[in-house]
Amino acid sequence: MTPGLRLTPAGRALLGLGVAGLLAGVVAGRPDWVAVGALALGLLGAARGLLDQRLRTAGGVAFELALPGGHVATRGAELPLVLRARRPAAGRALPCRISLRIQGDPAGADPIAIRVPGAADGQLAFRLRFPRVGHWHVHGVQLDLTDPLGLFEAWGYAALERRLAIHPRPVAHGGPRGRPRGAHVAPLGRHAAQREGDGVELRELRDYVPGDPLRAIAWRATARRRTPVVSAREQETRRRVQLLLDMGPSMRAGAPGQAPLDQAIDACAAAVEAMGRDPVGLTTFDHRIHGHLDPGGGAAHRQRLRAQLVELTRVIDADLTAIARGELALRVGRFLEAQDGLPLDRAEVHARNARRALVDPLGEQYDPGALYAAVTRYLAAERERGHAALFARARPAEDLLEARLRLFCALRGLPLPYRLTGALDAREQGLRAALVRNLRTGGPDDLWIWTDPRDLDPDGPALEALGLASKRKRRVVLHGPLPPPAVAARLRRYRVEVRPLALTPRAP
């Protein structure tokens, strides 16, 4: 357990009183003032001794984490977690406050004041709720202690790493052919597209055109008309749907769980589930395409779609996050020291790079060689288990060390801040790239888009791409806030259906 110690405000006031009493008493020749100062410092020493005793007791407590309901939960639902405390020998009960450190934060759950039993075992039940989907990590347990006089406060940290998977929450829907109530998406399920082909329903009789197959010739009609006639029949095919999801800064704005991106992820997950085995794909974009899956069916394909939705909360690409290389190294170094107990802070490194530290203090905080070696060892072990394959197509950074630091943050649950600003036409370029990617020959029939159309240019590249989709007979449904009049008029001209982004979640 890693301990820490500091004075409380009352302790700092008492320390100031003691020092001032001693100095003033010596200067003024007042023995009573000296006695008051000595008494204050004596109280501080006694309180420190009692707290050291509690710290030694806390150091002998072993903790274990258990997940009775498993490590998978839905967004907003309760996930039970049991913390067991075990002491090797009998002794006095230990009063303390216990909190879980989740995703690198020291107070991932509300601290709970308990008394660790003097002997045997004790356990504490936490009920966690996660507002967003993604891969969350419980990193450990933090104990906060104080002395009986309240002059010092100390804390201890025990590393207990657990990985949790939070999936999109279910949305009520009316069956495989209905639509999710409140999700405002296009009707789900099988959609028959009438195309000319080798079906059984007769569409029309028309004149023969060079290139038509001989088996399509209607011989009786040809004999009656005395000219070659072809029977064109309809072929029923399943309409292929592509989900286009904007993951940019404006979609992430808002309280956790209430951002447009959180609602859009739920809606996309509901659409994937309701489509069943029908072909459905996913394209995620910001100022460029981030991920793409062509329409497909089957359980394996739906699993890949859900995995891409969950991965949107731990983006590591350098052009999509806002963190400097030195700050990134500092965050990883502090985590490795606390979580794995690695001695990365080298005094000789600080002495050797004293002048450089004045220019870039964050980059010189830890020994780069030791940091690189620790991160590389962990990534090698993760690659053997196949976790690093999730990021095979990511573009984290050009520098090798920075790229590995970013990948380490994703796998160990250290979230990187998503960038809040960008080019003014970033959404235009990203939406256009996503549309062009899906308008190629043989592409999907329906395009369901989740984005914010309020800042689109009526004459910009994104609206031009929507016009191209209309010309190519694609059905486009746009989910998001109501656009301004100029954009709305252009969308109506292109027969783009606009639906507000609002969800009615089903009780878990």
Image: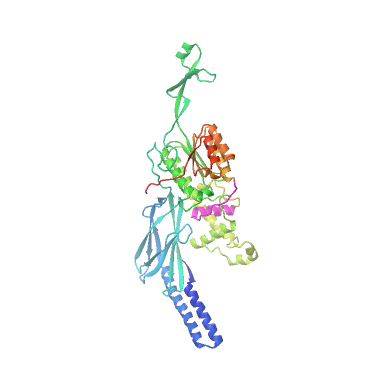
Task: State the image quarter where residue 441 is shown.
Answer: top right
- 411 inside magenta stretch: yes
Query: What residue is shown at x 48% (from left), y 83% (from top)?
Result: 36
Vertically, is 372 above or below 487? below
- 404 inside magenta stretch: yes
| Numbered range of the magenta stretch | 400-424
Residue 337 position, x and y percent, is 51, 62
Residue 199 position, x and y percent, is 44, 24
Vertically, is 145 above or below 46? above
Task: State the image quarter where residue 119 is shown.
Answer: bottom left
Q: Residue furthest front?
A: 485
- Depth order, front residue of 115/393: 115
Residue 19 position, x and y percent, is 52, 80
Query: What residue is shown at x 41% (from left), y 74% (from top)?
Result: 148
Q: Quadrant of the N terminus?
A: bottom left
Report the number of numbered marks: 0
